[in-house]
Image (cartoon, grey):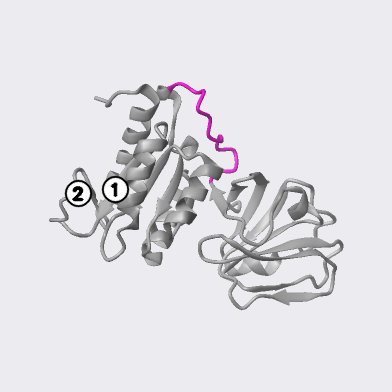
Amino acid sequence: MAPREARVESDAGIVCERCVVADSFPLRLRGLLGQRRLASGHGVFLTATSSLHTTFMRFPIDVVFLDRELTVIGVRAEMRPWRFTGRLRAKHILELSAREAERRGVGAGSRLRLIEPATAPSAGRAIAAHQHTATSIRVVLGASDRRFLRVASFLLGRSGFAVSSATRFAELMRAVERSTPDVVVLDASPPARWTTRAAAALQSTATDVGVLLLTDEPTSGIPNALPKWGSFERLTDEIRRVHARELTGALPA
């Protein structure tokens, strides 16, 4: 069976048009071995690893170290053959052609998104509402619960949504400003209440952004809030409904 391919994006644009997802030991072991070159726009996304080597390779590469949320924690540019590198905090690694990270604006602190399949279309607000699918909906997740962010980001990403996340009010507002999302999903569960403040700020200033609240308190008193750990299908359906409402200016049927 052919390996999975994905597209990698950041808030600055596309990082890798066609990226092989090395999510098994044989694929991670093989990596780029045996290839004569790595073309611009191509790469390998190594899951569940913090180090790599370039033994037997024939060309230099850029090595991008990522944490669990796919935030860049470091870049080793133009790593030559027969070298070894690693980062203790890294959970995944993206291999790009030499100098590609700089060309694509990828550096420490960049937030990346893995979108499958690689040919999935990017977001486009000019597309009519009935043409929008999960692959064209950009979502920003806001929560203090990092476990929830990891799980939700992974599941939404696997379903084709373009996802970024934030754990603080200022970080969320910057993410909204940078990525102009279609929908913002906020965890309003205690003890952190900054998300309700963020919801109020977004609803009063960002009229073209849909806001969806989640909570793990059934009696929280937050109108229309969804269960935080409820059905994932229901969450994706609600994201689509909120997005459709923002596009058409009316509640969908």
Badge 2, how many Cα within 10 Å: few under 14, some, many 20+? some
**The disc labelled 1 sits on which kind of residue?**
Leu
Badge 1, how many Cα within 10 Å: few under 14, some, many 20+? many
Residue positioned 40% across, 54% down in the render: 142
**Which residue is disc 1 drawn over?**
213
**The disc labelled 2 sits on which kind of residue?**
Ile
246 relative position to 35: left or right: left
Secondary structure predominantly adopted by residues drawn in magenta: loop
Residue positioned 57% across, 55% down in the render: 111
**Which residue is disc 2 drawn over?**
222
Cα distance in 3D space between marks 1 and 2: 8 Å
Residue 32 forms part of the magenta stretch: no
Of residues 223 and 63, the one nearer the viewer is 223
Residue 52: which disc? Answer: none
What range is drawn magenta here? 116-128
Query: Residue 59's x, y, as percent?
Result: 86, 61
Of residues 108 and 24, the one nearer the viewer is 108
Q: Earlier in the sequence, mark 1 or mark 2?
A: 1
236 relative position to 174: left or right: left
Label 1–label 2 contact, CB within 8 A: yes
Secondary element under disc 2, as helix, strand or loop, is loop
42 relative position to 161: left or right: right
16 relative position to 165: left or right: right
Q: Quadrant of the C terminus?
A: top left
Does 157 sit above or below residue 151? Answer: above
